[in-house]
Amino acid sequence: MSQPNFTGLAGGLSLLGLLVASPAVLGQGLGNSPYSRLGLGDASLNSGGVRQMAMGGIGVAAPNSVNVNEINPALIYYTTRTTFEGGYSGQFKTLRNNVSRQRTGSANLGYLALAVPINRRWAGAIGLKPYSAVDYESTTIDNSVVGDQTAQVEKQYKGSGGLAEAYMSHAVRVGKGLTAGVSVGYVFGSIDQEAGTRVGTSSIPLELASRDIYQQHIHYSDFAFRAGAHYRGKFNDKLNYNLGGTYSFRSNLNGERSLSLIRQTYVGLQSSLTALEVDATGRAQVPALTQFGISLDDNRSWSVSLEGTRQQWSQFRAFGEQGGTAGIPLSDTYRMAIGGELTPDVASVDSYFKRVTYRAGLSVAQLPYRPGGNTLYDRAVSWGFAFPLPTATPLDATTISLAFMYGQRGNTNTLQLADGTLERNVKEDYVRMQLGVTLNNRWFIKRRIQ
């Protein structure tokens, strides 16, 4: 029996104990996203936490002693106090093409991280963060059926699930101003996809027709590795520069796939089930990710960063299929971002708002999908705030952070494919929000006997 081909993106519209939690609780399912049908879904691209989101997703070369910066494992070294951080994410979006529009959104736990300074040259961290998310649903009806002018074909596509990464990172000071770090992550999770079809005729209306559903379930799990380096130097006593880079090695995620063909009655009851494949083994080859950044800061008040990212999605394979089980070849992607933060007066006594940190950033990224050879982009502007609680002491401090991002990705162009059919691109307008809580505490204080 031939297997349906998941082609055409138009069909896509439509702390320790927690490290073994299901990825379903971790930033998954943030609203209908047709582009999550590609590859392993919407990839996180090692984008960091609430501080990084507010600055346009930058952080590779932006050291910070308050937040956990796991984008570059080498920056864990700058953790001066034991730091626990968690984020809660939400998203609202509007999807549209040139014939329809839909609004959707959701909210989930975003990430968890714990960083500990081990000694003067060594720090470590553990955490749980999203790796990719799949969430899409669409229904299309075709009234132009050759040979039967009264027939209608309804196609329905659904996808859900995603992957999470539980990681451990270590950073060491190699020399003056130079730090290096490594991160080992365990990636795990499941992706479910369905492609359903039913045909209505003059004798059996569409709403009374049975539906044939091609169902796919894949569970992935394996290790992923990332290395990073950072150098901090001085132009003078008031101005520092930072150079940082990370390299996420290509991963081969082991997978188990089950395929089924289901027939449903018009009321949604299952009338038959045929297992096409049960727990067949395979793998997903996730391409390497390279990130590089440069930043300037004055030690306490401000910093500004510029970063670039590259990932070779053209090398992505899943169960031997180029582009993955959706059957859509992917292309290499690049991302550029600039961002910064400003704290007017960290030690201000007269004004609380001078102690607040203000953040902003801009980013533009290519999508790996190239309809008709045309490049689609994801453009966004970010901003945010960090509010230190007034109860802070040299031993204990709490910071509440907010991050916002408004962006657009894709477009509403209509393309005519080689077979004469039309494919309508989908444009997403989205607003993402993240609430983060950071707890800093100094552990392992040596007591002095008078």
Image: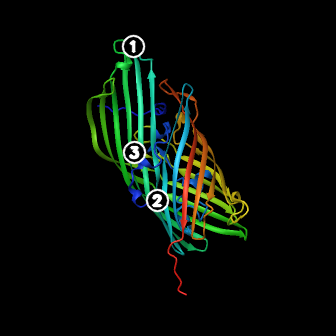
Q: Residue at x 39, y 52 (%)?
A: 253
Residue bearing the label numbered 1: 148
Residue bearing the label numbered 3: 318
Q: Nearer the viewer, residue 315 or 424?
A: 424
Q: Position of residue 379 (x, y in %)?
A: 61, 43
Marks 1/3: CA–CA distance:
38 Å
Mark 1 element type: loop
Position of residue 180 relative to residue 315, above or below, is below
Label number found at residue 127:
2
Q: Residue at x 45, y 46 (%)?
A: 316
Mark 3 element type: strand
Q: Earlier in the sequence, mark 1 or mark 2?
A: 2
**Left or right: 426, with 22 as reference point:** right
Q: Are marks 1 and 3 in contact (CB under 8 Å)?
A: no
Q: Amino acid at mark 3?
A: Ala
Q: Nearer the viewer, residue 25 or 184?
A: 25
- Residue 57 visible in the shown view: no
Q: Earlier in the sequence, mark 3 or mark 2?
A: 2
Q: Nearer the viewer, residue 442 or 330?
A: 442
Q: Amino acid at mark 2?
A: Gly
Label number found at residue 375:
none
Position of residue 369 relative to residue 283, above or below, is above
> Can you tell which of label 3 and label 2 is closer to the viewer?
2
The C terminus sits in image quarter: bottom right
Marks 1/2: CA–CA distance:
57 Å
Position of residue 402 relative to residue 348, above or below, is above
